[in-house]
Image: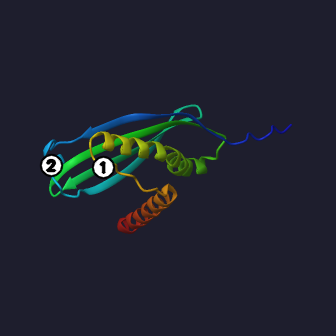
Amino acid sequence: MNEPQQQPTFGIEKIYVKDLSLEIPHAPEVFLSGEQPQVDVQLHNEAAAIGEGLYQVVLTVTVTAKAGDKTMFLVEAAQAGIFQIRNVPESDMEPLLATACPNILFPYVRESVSDIIGRAGFPPVYLAPVNFEAIYLQRMQEAKEQAGSKIEIAH
């Protein structure tokens, strides 16, 4: 007798701030400066299995604002989620963890970053939407090209 195939399931178990830090190394002088800061935003996400069908995904955003060579502020926020993912083919797991989960976490980390910068006394920084699928596809393409060049070097 054939067993019925299990339906894929995807669910959010918990969303939380794993880490949040703010540095204003040149306070109070930076508040007296009229310079417009240059803002740099870096994103990083990682995923790990934490139990049977449970995965933690952490999306880290680092925002650095500089005026000239002085750092006005540095914010790092790590937004995490525990996701239940079951009966998903192994080939679909990496794209799911690298695109769908960060898409869910991004609005939360975006709000945390904007809020902490505003509370620090600076005009809020609103992070632009991010296309995690495009980032994932670009990384896969770069990895494929690097693998190709490694093979060529080995000859």
Q: Position of residue 127 (x, y in %)?
A: 40, 53
Q: Quadrant of residue 121?
A: top left
Image point 17% across, 42% down: which residue? 25
Give the numbered dot on residue 32. Answer: 2
Q: Of the two numbered discs 2 and 1 on the same chain, state the one appearing first in sequence.
A: 2
Q: Nearer the viewer, residue 54 or 133?
A: 133
- Image: 36 above or below 57: below
- Image: 48 above or below 68: above
Q: Quadrant of the C terminus?
A: bottom left
Q: Nearer the viewer, residue 6 or 120?
A: 120
Identity, as a three-letter code, of the amino acid under mark 2: Leu
Tell me how far mark 2 sits from mark 1, CA to CA: 14 Å
Residue 121 left/right relative to 95 = left
Say which residue label 1 marks. 123
Residue 63 left/right relative to 15 = left
- Image: 54 above or below 30: above
Identity, as a three-letter code, of the amino acid under mark 1: Pro
Q: Nearer the viewer, residue 114 or 15?
A: 114
Q: Position of residue 50 (x, y in %)?
A: 50, 32
